[in-house]
Amino acid sequence: MLNDLYHALDPVAFSAGPITIYWYGIAYMVGAIITGVVMYRTQKRWKLDIAVDDIWVVITCVVIGLIVGARIFYLVFYGRGLEFYLQNPFEIIALQHGGMSFHGGLVGGTIGGFLATRWVGLAPGTIADLVACGVPLALALGRFANFVNGELWGKPTDLPWGVVFGGDAGMMPRHPSQLYEGALEGLVLFAVLYVLSRKRPLLPQGSFMGIFILGYGIARILVEFVRVPDAQLGYLVGDIVTMGQILSIPLLIIGVGLIIIAQRAKLPQQGHVGEV
């Protein structure tokens, strides 16, 4: 039973004196490494000749932008309000208390990645596609870490894989919505992009990022139907619509728009700017 498995899990990976390392932090670190590895292997398959150092410059800038953007979006859209953070300023950076928004991470990571491509002279469209091919695995790790933490749980269910999370979630079995998201926006989306990345001729610049954004938006909206919204927000419309769904609707539009633009422009995948 999954509830037996959950109760055997500890959010803390290990601790030594004042240092405590959480599985969530490890998930971020390993996810960034895996994304870089996928990017490098994919660009080799595409014969782009991008240096390993340039890949890691991009990954570093993406991660920094992601963390900043994810935290800012959480504070603005999911946080406890301006008055609370003015009275408790250290809570703004208290990441150990939770509070990271994917939508903000996407914006911040995109900005960070774009600045990195300008710095090392890489084609932004192709780098965005390479990042899109690898980042679903990082998302999967993050969602699995959410499950280990016993957070972001789903609605009550009588299905055989319902999980008892305890604490604020009570003792009734609930949908393991973290695992649903990890599977859909992580493993399934990665598999789709991996298959497409091996096809010939290659899809034009921007296609993979468009597919990733569209796929994530669909997966997030679907899972939100069985996921309990943040307590401080609740449902925004009736007992159905959540903030996560509202923020994901623009992703559908952006994803479709990027795919259409990419198909019309038909720019080839290239490594450094100016390559043919």
Image (cartoon, rainbow, N blue to C red):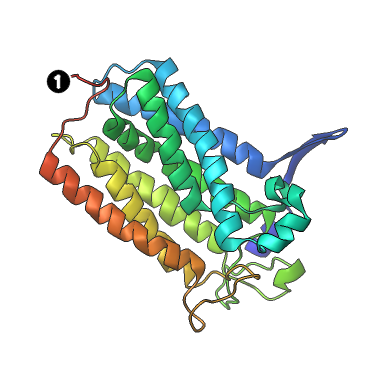
Taking depth in this image into account, of 188 and 152 the one nearest to the observer is 152
Residue at far bottom of view: 238
Left or right of 256? Residue 200 is left
**Where is 42 relative to 110, above or below?**
above
Q: Identify the residue at image location x=58%, y=78%.
A: 158
Residue 266 shown left or right of residue 16 in the figure:
left
Q: What type is the residue that disc 1 sits on?
A: Val
In this picture, is 114 found above or below 250?
above
Mark 1 secondary-structure assignment = loop
- Dividing the image into 4 quarters, which one contains the N terminus? bottom right
* Res 25 seen here: yes
Q: Quadrant of the C terminus?
A: top left
Q: Does 19 sit left or right of 54 as displayed?
A: right
Q: From what the image shows, is residue 53 above or below residue 171?
A: above
Residue at screen point 26% across, 20% down: 48
Q: Residue 223: give x, y in percent of width and height.
A: 46, 66
Residue 1 shows in this picture: no
- Density class for disc 1 (Cα within 10 Å; few <14, some 14-19, many ≥20) is few
Dividing the picture into quadrants, the one containing residue 273 is: top left
Q: Mark 1 — residue?
A: 276
| Residue 249 or residue 41, whichever sits in front | 249
Snapshot quadrant of residue 125: top left
Point out residue 153 in the picture as x, y percentages from the top left corner.
61, 65
276 sits to left or right of 34: left
